[in-house]
Amino acid sequence: MSPAVYRRRRLVVGVLALLIIVGLVFGAVAVIKMFAGGNAEADGATTAPGQTTPAQAGQDSKAATESQPASPTPTPQSGCADSKVVVEASTDKSVYQAGAKPVLTLSVSNKGEKPCEVNVGTSQMEFLVTSGDDRVFSSRDCQAEPSDLVRTIEPGKSEKANFMWERNRTTPGCNPVEMNPKPGYYVLVTKLGERVSDKTSFELR
């Protein structure tokens, strides 16, 4: 084979290789454009920087809703006005024969329209018996381990506590008193914290 023929064949092979490389490059560019176009159609729309797509707006709205604190559940009112919570005093009888022990009752009622949380524990209660200016008995004088007890009282409802009085006298500090109350008329007042009942009277015989 002559040198001229050999050179022509090498030139043809080089041109074909160049055409193949160029074809591959254009094909790769076309494939890239096709995928780019397909993604844009799948996403629906492109957005400018700082804008939000409808899907993102929905997600942002949901996230904002989830981040907001839930509305607090209404709770019973604590510290109801004194005019709404009423304390009353009563006895199981109006007259007690000799030796009979009176049962003293403290009632606390909710006269309002909303539930009220009230401390009805022994730390707040007092049963006070008097006769004229004579302070005869108080349940606080010899009270042991007073405690708190918070109750929710619904509108129109009440809580009651009963105390059996031994017909004895007491003094602050629980000092012993030998003299017992004599027959006659006595007055009961009940207290719950700063709330005070009206007076109710009864007779000891």
Image (cartoon, rainbow, N blue to C red):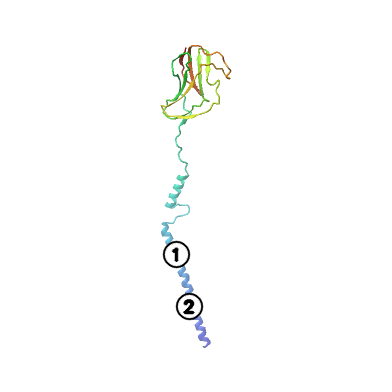
Residue 138 position, x and y percent, is 53, 19
**CA separation in Å, label 2 and label 1:** 26 Å
Q: Quadrant of residue 158?
A: top left
Q: Secondary structure at mark 2?
A: helix
Q: Residue at the location (43% across, 64% down)?
A: 34
Q: Which is more N-terminal, label 1 or label 2?
A: 2
Locate residue 59, reporting x and y percent: 44, 50
Residue 94 x/y as whole percent: 44, 15
Asked if 154 appears above or below 175 in the picture, the reply is below
What kind of residue is marked 1?
Lys
In the rendered structure, the answer to whether residue 110 lies left or right of residue 2 reads left
Dot 1 falls on a residue whose secondary structure is helix
In the foreground, 149 or 204: 204
Q: Position of residue 57 (x, y in %)?
A: 44, 50
Q: Residues within 10 Å of mark 1 (few under 14, many from 20)?
A: few
Which residue, as the protein is rendered here, is positioned at the far front? Answer: 99
Q: Nearer the viewer, residue 92 or 116?
A: 92
Which residue is identified by label 2? Answer: 16
Q: How would you rate the neighbour count of disc 2 (Cα within 10 Å): few for under 14, some for 14-19, many for 20 or more?
A: few
Residue at x 51%, y 15% (from the top left corner): 130
- What is the count of numbered marks? 2
From what the image shows, is residue 12 above or below residue 85? below
Does residue 4 show up?
Answer: yes
Mark carried by residue 21: none
Q: Are marks 2 and 1 in contact (CB under 8 Å)?
A: no
Residue of label 1: 33
In the rendered structure, which amino acid carries the disc numbered 2? Leu
